[in-house]
Amino acid sequence: MLTKEEKDKIIKDNEIHPGDTGSSEVQIAIITNRIKYLTQHFSAHKKDFHSRTGLMKLVGQRKRLLGYLKKKDAKRYENLIQKLELRK
């Protein structure tokens, strides 16, 4: 899972101002990290359907946050997409 040090690093990399932990960018970056971890988890545990349900909820939450950020500030949205390499 995500250790405190890794989470702090993600927050530092994506914060808008010092001490920022709740902005859309930070939330999306943390969720993206959790999604990447779960996709690796499923390569070893193919029948873990309960965790797959959680993964689908995380994907939906990230999608809603990305939509909100795109509607609110398109430039920040584009920068975040490039930074997290979400669209290929």
Image (spheres, grey):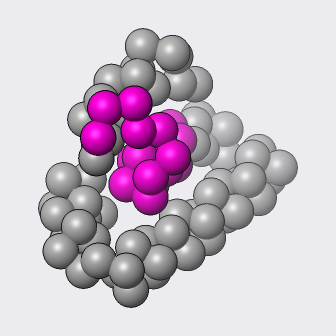
Residue 59 occupies which quadrant of the picture?
bottom right
Where 85 falls versus 5 (above or below)? Answer: below
Residue extending furthest toward the right: 50
Residue extending furthest toward the bottom: 71
Residue 79 at x, y percent in the picture: 17, 63
Which residue is drawn at the image coordinates 67% and 38% (left, top)? Answer: 45
Residue 35 at x, y percent in the picture: 52, 49
Residue 87 occupies which quadrant of the picture?
bottom left
Left or right: where does residue 9 sit relative to residue 83? right
Where 71 falls versus 6 (above or below)? Answer: below
Residue 88 at x, y percent in the picture: 20, 70
Residue 30 at x, y percent in the picture: 47, 42
**Which is the main secondary structure of the residues drawn in magenta?**
helix
Which residue is drawn at the image coordinates 33% and 24% (left, top)? Answer: 9
Of the pair 81 and 37, the residue shown nearer to us: 81
Q: Is residue 46 magenta?
A: no
The reply to whether residue 32 is visible in this rendering is: no
The reply to whether residue 12 is visible in this rendering is: yes
Which residue is drawn at the image coordinates 47% and 38% (left, top)? Answer: 21
- Quadrant holding the N terminus: top right
Where 2 falls versus 81 (above or below)? Answer: above
Which residue is drawn at the image coordinates 51% and 46% (left, top)? Answer: 22
> The magenta stretch spans which residues?
17-37
Left or right: where does residue 24 sit relative to residue 42? left
Left or right: where does residue 53 sit relative to residue 9? right
Residue 15 occupies which quadrant of the picture?
top left
Q: Is residue 24 magenta?
A: yes
Where 82 falls versus 44 (above or below)? Answer: below
